[in-house]
Amino acid sequence: MAHVEATVSRPAGLRLRQWAASPRGGGLLALAVVIALLPLVLGNNYFYEIAILVALNAIVCVGLNLLIGYAGQISLGHAGFFALGGYGSAILSGSHGWPTWLAMPSSCAAVGVLAFVVGRPTLRLKGHYLAMATLGLGIIISIVLSTEDRITGGPDGMPVPPLALFGWSLRGEHTWYWIAGAGLLLAVWLALNLIESPVGRALRALHGSEIAAETVGIASARYKLKVFVLSAVFAAVAGALTAHYAGFITPSKASFMHSVELVIMVVFGGMASVFGAVVGAAILTTLPQLLTVLKDYEMMVFGAVLIATMVFFPQGVVPTLGRWLRRGSR
Amino acid sequence: MGSQWLQYVASGLTAGAIYALVALGFSIIYNASQAINFAQGEFVMIGGMTAVTLVGAGTPLAVAVPLAVLAAVAVGLLLEKVAIEPARKADTVTLIIITIGASLLLRGLAQLVWDKRVHSLPAFSGDRPLQLMGATVLPQSLWVLVGAALAVAGLSWFFGRTLFGKAMLATSYNPLAARLVGINTRTVLFVSFGLAAGLGALGGVLIAPIAFTSYDSGIMLGLKGFAAAMLGGLGSFGGAVLGGLLLGLAEGLGAGFVSSAYKDAIAFVIILAVLFFMPGGLLGARRSDRV
């Protein structure tokens, strides 16, 4: 109690400085600086495009990382949520004439409801049943999207109207860079706050010992469900943004392979590390774009990276490097 | 009408026998490690592709089939040694992610070693269809059913009559107790991967003349085998066979009478239904731990 009062009575300037020095505030600040300064080195639209893709993928990974790293569950169907977010917004705004600012949140909320419906019964079971449920759901979504061609355009995909706000239509790489960057900052800020909140503390307790956590009254299933729904909504938002940015969406966005790629990004960057997820998304989105020569080896390299990460750095690259740095500075 | 039914049942059972073999592989590895081996479908692909290559090079079928199965067994054992063994102490999520990595790696390698085209193996005993009570049945379908039945019989002999088979069963019931009575659970895990790979490859070889094979043909077969294992009850061998046959039948009848476009979705709807309503599966543990 004394600790709380002491924090409250400190002057605002000191609190701000403390916030910036904490890993939470400092990291967020560093990310904002990177996003603000990156345009100085982005030569042309092609690099802007990659940066936008990185930021949008990173939003998915930040959400998925909460699920994998903090709730200890994997989802093999996040690509399904990603694609549904995009298709929902595209169909509502494109085929039904809804304004995009209404279509996008509606579609993402619907994905949240779907995640709730699937997560509620499966997360009550002990073990890794969520992985199986999301795997099944993701593939069903992908099959439905390719088959219902009158609504979705089938395997060829469908056009998506540009995002419009207050009568302004948002186009162009530069505009989208700032939209994606702001979205990523918001996602990271939300995730960091969640981790520090009672929900985050409960989740960390669960990770330590589920039985002990239950004994002190933590309803583990409820917290896992919250995080799962939140991560699905993150994926849907990123999916909708990606669709409106690209102006086109195909069912390949929902593929099992895409779900696996998202898991690889999180695991590679670092489970239970929000910034690890961002770094993982950045590296694994950029590499295939730059190394197009290696197109034929892409799958093999991804597989090898995944195995090597799990065997040699089970914590992921960012937390492992962080530990080395701390040990070195001592 | 009757013959139409029979036709769908015949094609359903053929696919179902393959799902059963793949599902057995999932259950064997699940019993030894509590992990789901997502590379199981790749063993099926390796079996099919190796057999195609060997036969293409002039090897007689009777030699090519066992060699293809052995090749997959070697890959399975190697995978366990290189990727699973070093992470043995890690938690289940880590193991599952490693097997996902292994499936990508094997698929990527197959794309390099072979190519991206679709291959076919000649049928074991000709292509002339047999007439069976009004339904047309490919002779290869009989090979599939007989081959799968023999594999299941061999497996039940192994688990019921041999010391090592019993040691594997003991490990699945309680790994700690198994270690206490002197069972080397590391060897059990090692052999499990070889056995699962062999079963998958056998399925891959048997189905290759009917369903074709390519570097990525393992994905769907693997996932459907997994659905079959879930349906029967993960870890139950009888359940794996039952689940495989039921899934095959559901697909055959569903494709015939409901919608062929949604044939591939049936397996995944079953996964969700099992999880929602009977998480233990048909023959799995009756108690499913609820949190």
Image (cartoon, rainbow, N blue to C red):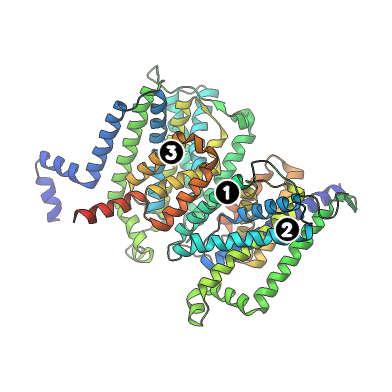
CB atoms of marks 2 and 3 within 8 Å: no
Say the numbered circle drawn on residue B23: none
In this figure, which residue is indicated by the disc labeled 2? B17
At 69% from the left and 72% from the top, the residue drawn is B156
Q: Name the subunit of mark 2.
A: B
Q: Which chain carries label 1?
A: B
> In x, y percent, where is residue A131?
50, 53
Task: Give coordinates of residue B78: x percent, y percent.
Answer: 55, 61
Residue at image coords 32%, 64%: A216
| Residue A62 found in image quarter | top left
Q: Are marks 1 and 2 in contact (CB under 8 Å)?
A: no
Residue occupying image coordinates x 28% and y 54%? A323
A23 lies above or below B291? above
Q: What residue type is labelled 1?
A: Leu
Q: Relative to residue B60, is residue A145 drawn left or right? A: left
SS at mark 3? helix
Sequence-earlier tag: 1 or 2: 2
| Number of numbered labels in the structure image | 3
Picture coordinates of residue A190 (x, y %)? 32, 41
Q: How crowded is mark 2: few (under 14 residues within 10 Å), some or many (20 or more)?
A: many
Q: Residue furthest bottom?
A: B181
Q: Quadrant of the N terminus of chain A?
A: bottom left
**Residues marked 2 and 3, same chain:** no
Dot 2: element: helix
Q: Name the residue under label 3.
A: A287
Residue lying at the far top of the rendered structure: A167
Q: Residues within 10 Å of mark 3 (few under 14, many from 20)?
A: few
Disc number placed over residue B109 in the picture, else none: 1
What's the CA distance linking mark 1 and mark 2? 27 Å
As drawn, B155 above or below B281: below
Viewer-proximal residue, B14 or A294?
A294
Q: Do dots 3 and 1 share one subunit?
A: no
